[in-house]
Amino acid sequence: MSVSQLAELLKQNEEQLLDKWMAAQRAAGIRIDLIDERAIQESSRELLKAVTIALAQGSDDIETAAWKPLMAQLERLSVTQARQGFTPSETATFIFSLKEPLFDLVQSQGDNAINLVWLISKLIDKLGLFSVEYYMAGRESVIREQQESLLELSTPVVQLWDGVLAVPLIGALDSNRTQIVMESLLQKIVETESDIAIIDITGVPTVDTMVAQHLLKTITAAKLMGARCIISGIRPQIAATIVHLGVELGDVVTKASLSDAFKLALKELDVRLVNAKAR
C-alpha cells in the first residue's frame, strides 16, 4: 500500500477514524475545564483532513511543502493549548492518541499493509514532538508576557503634585526592568508635562556599578525630555557602596527619603505649603 493509497483509506474511513480518535482522547482524559469537547472534535476533524491531504500528495516527509498547512495548524493549536493551561503531556496526547486508531485501520487491510505500521508510527511521533516543541515556545511566550506585566506593576509612575512624578522602585534592577522604568517614566513625563521626577530606591536592596549605570541612563533620558531628576532613599550603606565603587553621579541631586525629595521638588517649583492649623 502506497502513501497515496493510505490517504484514500483515511478519506474513506474519516468518520469512523474520527470517532475512535475521540474515544481515545476521552480515555486519556479531556480537559473539559479548559476547552469544550466540541472544539476538540472540530480540531481533530481539521487535523485529520490536513493529514489526509498531505499524504494524498505522495509524501510522508513533514518537511516538504505538502505538509506546511498541517504543520501551521498544529503550531497554532499547540501554542493555543499552552496559553489555555494544558500540560505538555496533554498537548502531546492529542497527537499520540491518533496512533492506535490508525494502526487498527491499517492492520484491517491485511498483510500488505504491515509495512505502513512503521511509517505511521514515525509520522505520529514526529507530529507529536513538533506539537510539544511549539507548546514549549508558547509557554515561554506566556512566561515572558507575565514577567513583563509583573515588571510594569512593580515599577509604577505616580504623580505626587502638578509637575512632580515619582517612581518608587522595589527589588533588584536589571537591564529589562530599567528599560521598562525608563519607558514608563518618559511616557508619563510627556503625558503630564512634568518638570521633576523623583526616583526612589528605598526598596532596592543593593546598588552595584550596573544598577548605578542603569539609574544614570534613566536620569539622562528624563533630562532629554526636559525633566530634572532627584534620587531618594539613599541609605548609609548604599551611599558607602556607591563611594566605594567610585560611581560618579555627576550633578544628580540625592535625598535620604522620598519626603525630603518631595519637599525639594515643591521648593524648586516655588510651591509653599501652609499648615491650616497654624493659622
Image: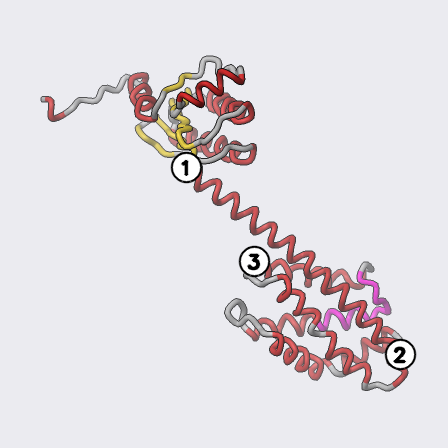
Is residue 271 depicted above or below 188 in this figure?
A: above
Is residue 148 depicted above or below 181 in this figure?
A: below
Residue ID for mark 3:
83
Label 2 – label 1 distance at C-alpha: 65 Å
Judged from the image, the secondary structure of the residue bearing numbered disc 2 is loop
Sequence-first disc among 1 and 3? 3
Is residue 54 in the magenta section? yes
Label 3 – label 2 distance at C-alpha: 40 Å
> Which residues make up the magenta segment?
48-62
Task: Name the quarter where the N terminus is drawn.
Answer: bottom right
Q: Nearer the viewer, residue 187 or 262?
A: 262
Residue ID for mark 2:
1
Instruction: Locate residue 127: give its quadrant.
Output: bottom right
x 85%, y 78%: residue: 5
Judged from the image, the secondary structure of the residue bearing numbered disc 1 is loop
Judged from the image, the secondary structure of the residue bearing numbered disc 3 is helix
x 30%, y 28%: residue: 161
> Tag 3: Cα neighbours inside 10 Å, few (<14), some, or many (≥20)?
some
Residue ID for mark 1:
156
Q: From the viewer's perspective, is 79 left or right of 103?
A: left
Residue 260 in the image, given as x and y percentages of width and height: 31, 22
Residue 19 in the image, given as x and y percentages of width and height: 66, 82
Q: From the viewer's perspective, is 110 left or right of 72?
A: right
Instruction: Locate residue 13: give its quadrant.
Output: bottom right
Question: What is the chief secondary structure element of the magenta stretch?
Answer: helix
